[in-house]
Image (spheres, grey):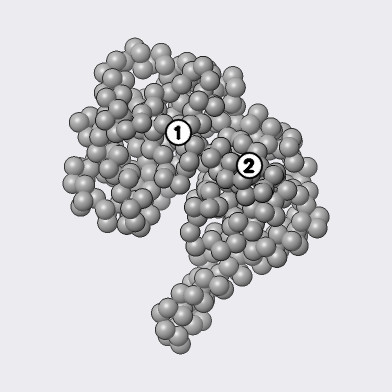
């Protein structure tokens, strides 16, 4: 099948899972990154406008024009490929009229990383969702909301364990000297809204241990409010390569996983990355844990006090932690390999 993927560079781990799985299944795949043209278009527009309009008008104009630019770019690429299926991660800033054009010759599948009802600054997200032939969400809470809104073609689906990129390896002494830690965490912060505070507040529960935190520039705006985290924070100027992320996880004991407030029941993909790398995730409880991990569950907590206690237990009990890491990995490899998960999604289209 000829398939076009609309996945931004910000979703590189998820994009790689889809792309590698589809290629391995024998499909012809073209990957389009809308953001590759996005920044270029912003700079072009700003140069042309210079100081001709006030700042607010400029911002609004840039938003409108970049949206037009991205949609023209994506449609041109899609029409060149003439796919039988277009897969979009979230809305990709598509406009309804763009979808209407390519749906004349292609099916349209939407994989929801975000809930359309909890996404800001996306005017057409719900309309794009309504236009999809198949919607896949890794959150049963989102699935229930969409079905309650009258949308019937909504399936639950997770991407599972990516055993090619996240796996147990024999780390070198050089790796261990450079990366070894008890707790490892990688995550971004956006803005200063109340949601942004949940992440650093969560991580303060692990500072009694050796913890290394990696994140973007936005962390510097919020760290002064959480001074205990500052000695543990490391700035990332560019996204961490997947190979390095796997090595760092292999040099760690546990990975704490917080749930974004916009996730109702779903599981963060980092749970599966950590288990693939052979370490134990300590997970903020969401209902889908019981749906996915039927007989073999990762340690989960319903409040931050529990998180602190669980972290200490698994850091201090090496044999139990290592045993559980193996059991979780075996369970996922048997039931939720990425290729099998993607194949199940496509079988419903």
Give the mark nearer the N terminus: 1 vs 2: 2
Q: Is residue 60 left or right of residue 132?
A: left
For residue 97, what is the image quadrant? Answer: bottom right
Q: Residue at point 65% right, 35% down?
A: 342
Q: Assign a secondary structure to mark 1.
A: loop
Image coordinates of residue 251 in percent, x first then y, are 35, 27
User: Looking at the image, which is closer to me, 136 or 142?
Assistant: 142
Nearer the camera: disc 1 or disc 2: 1
Image coordinates of residue 193 in percent, x first then y, are 34, 56
Q: Mark 2 points at which residue?
A: 136
Q: Assign a secondary structure to mark 2.
A: strand
Above or below residue 3? Residue 170 is above
Q: Is residue 197 left or right of residue 339?
A: left
Above or below residue 303? Residue 225 is below
Q: In this view of the protein, can residue 88 be seen by the observer?
A: no
Q: How crowded is mark 2: few (under 14 residues within 10 Å), some or many (20 or more)?
A: many
User: Looking at the image, which is closer to me, 304 or 33?
Assistant: 304
Q: Name the residue under label 1.
A: 286
């Amino acid at each position: 099948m000829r398939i076009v993927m609309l996945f931004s560079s910000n979703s590189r781990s998820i994009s790689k899972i889809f792309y590698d799985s589809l290629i391995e299944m024998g499909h012809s795949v073209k990957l389009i990154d809308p953001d590759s043209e996005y920044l270029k278009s912003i700079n072009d527009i700003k140069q042309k406008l210079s100081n001709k309009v006030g700042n607010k008008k400029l911002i609004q104009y840039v938003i409108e024009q970049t949206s037009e630019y991205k949609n023209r770019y994506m449609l041109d690429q899609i029409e060149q490929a003439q796919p039988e299926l277009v897969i979009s991660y979230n809305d990709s800033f598509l406009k309804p009229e763009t979808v209407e054009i390519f749906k004349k010759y292609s099916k349209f599948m939407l994989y929801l990383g975000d809930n359309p009802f909890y996404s800001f600054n996306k005017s057409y997200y719900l309309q794009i969702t309504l236009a999809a032939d198949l919607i896949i969400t890794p959150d049963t809470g989102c699935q229930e909301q969409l079905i309650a809104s009258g949308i019937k073609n909504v399936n639950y689906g997770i991407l599972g364990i990516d055993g090619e990129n996240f796996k147990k390896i024999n780390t070198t002494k050089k790796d261990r000297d450079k990366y070894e830690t008890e707790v490892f965490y990688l995550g971004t912060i956006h803005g200063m809204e109340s949601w942004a505070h949940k992440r650093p507040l969560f991580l303060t529960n692990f500072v009694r241990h050796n913890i290394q935190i990696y994140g973007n520039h936005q962390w510097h705006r919020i760290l002064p409010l959480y001074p205990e985290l500052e000695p543990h924070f490391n700035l990332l100027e560019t996204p961490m390569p997947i190979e390095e992320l796997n090595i760092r996880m292999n040099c760690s004991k546990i990975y704490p996983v917080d749930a974004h407030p916009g996730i109702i029941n779903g599981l963060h993909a980092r749970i599966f990355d950590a288990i693939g790398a052979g370490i134990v995730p300590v997970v903020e409880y969401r209902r889908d844990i019981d749906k996915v991990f039927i007989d073999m569950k990762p340690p989960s907590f319903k409040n931050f006090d529990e998180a602190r206690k669980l972290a200490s237990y698994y850091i201090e009990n090496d044999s139990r932690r290592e045993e559980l890491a193996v059991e979780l990995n075996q369970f996922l490899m048997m039931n939720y390999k990425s290729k099998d998960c993607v194949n199940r999604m496509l079988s419903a289209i």
